Amino acid sequence: MKLFALFLILGMGTILSGCKSNSASNAASQQDTSATNKEYYPISGYIKNQLKWLDSVPLAIIKYTTRDHHTDTSIVEKTDFNTIAEDLSFPDISSSILKKQYDEVSFIDASIGTISLTYSATNDTALIRKADVLLDQNSTAVRTIYLEKISRISDSTCTRKILWTANKNCLVTTIIQKPGSPESILEEKYVWDDR
């Protein structure tokens, strides 16, 4: 009888350890799956929603263009601004194809009540090199989105720094660097709510 009890205990131990290693391997495979199915903040989708909202309100879009310390002011049609804004947020780094090329780091700053999501390109050929999304910690509403895009135009490097402030404005700083020449900087600010 003692021998039977001993075999029963050893058998149960073997079964339990087998279950434990299976559940550990299942947990590891679930972690691997979640790593490949990461969810990034849909920046392009957010900007498209902002454009729909902007189309629905009676606000004019004022454009301030600054070059060489001189600023010109004009009014921009909403359809023209929609085209500009969609181009600024292209490509969508949250798409299944592109998100593999970015690393995400998140940070909660309780002192100012924000959640920061930072996306950094893992290669030097990505058009969007960096993206920052600043969310309100309580409501998770977007406060600002920052994008940094770098492209080559013939022998020049074009860097575009885009700062979208939710429901208020969009600032685009374009820096053109040609070999042997000083930087050319163009600042365009589109404002629809200056409060």
Image (cartoon, rainbow, N blue to C red):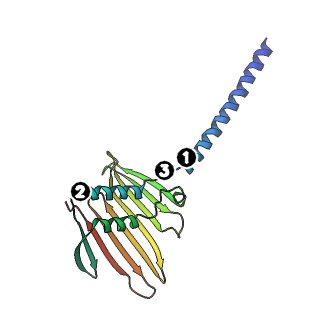
Query: Which residue lies under the disc numbered 2?
Result: 57
The residue that label 3 is drawn on is 39
In terms of sequence position, does the residue under pointer 2 or pointer 3 come before the other?
3
Q: Are marks 1 and 2 in contact (CB under 8 Å)?
A: no
CA–CA distance between discs 1 and 2? Answer: 40 Å
Residue at image point 32% right, 56% down: 52
Residue linked to disc 1: 34
Q: Nearer the viewer, residue 44 or 8?
A: 44
Say left or right for 38 vs 51: right
Q: Residues within 10 Å of mark 1 (few under 14, many from 20)?
A: few
> Percent position (x, y) of residue 182?
38, 85
Q: Residue at x 46, y 66 (%)?
A: 128
Quadrant of image for the C terminus: bottom left
- Do residues under tags 2 and 3 come within 8 Å of each other at their CB atoms? no
> In the rendered image, which quarter is residue 100 located in?
bottom right
Q: In the displayed orientation, state which residue is furthest to the bottom.
A: 180
Place of residue 76 in the rendered image (x, y in percent of width and height, measured from the top left) = 26, 70
Q: CA distance from mark 1 to mark 3?
A: 9 Å
Q: Compared to 93, does 76 lie above or below?
A: below
Circle 3: residue type? Glu
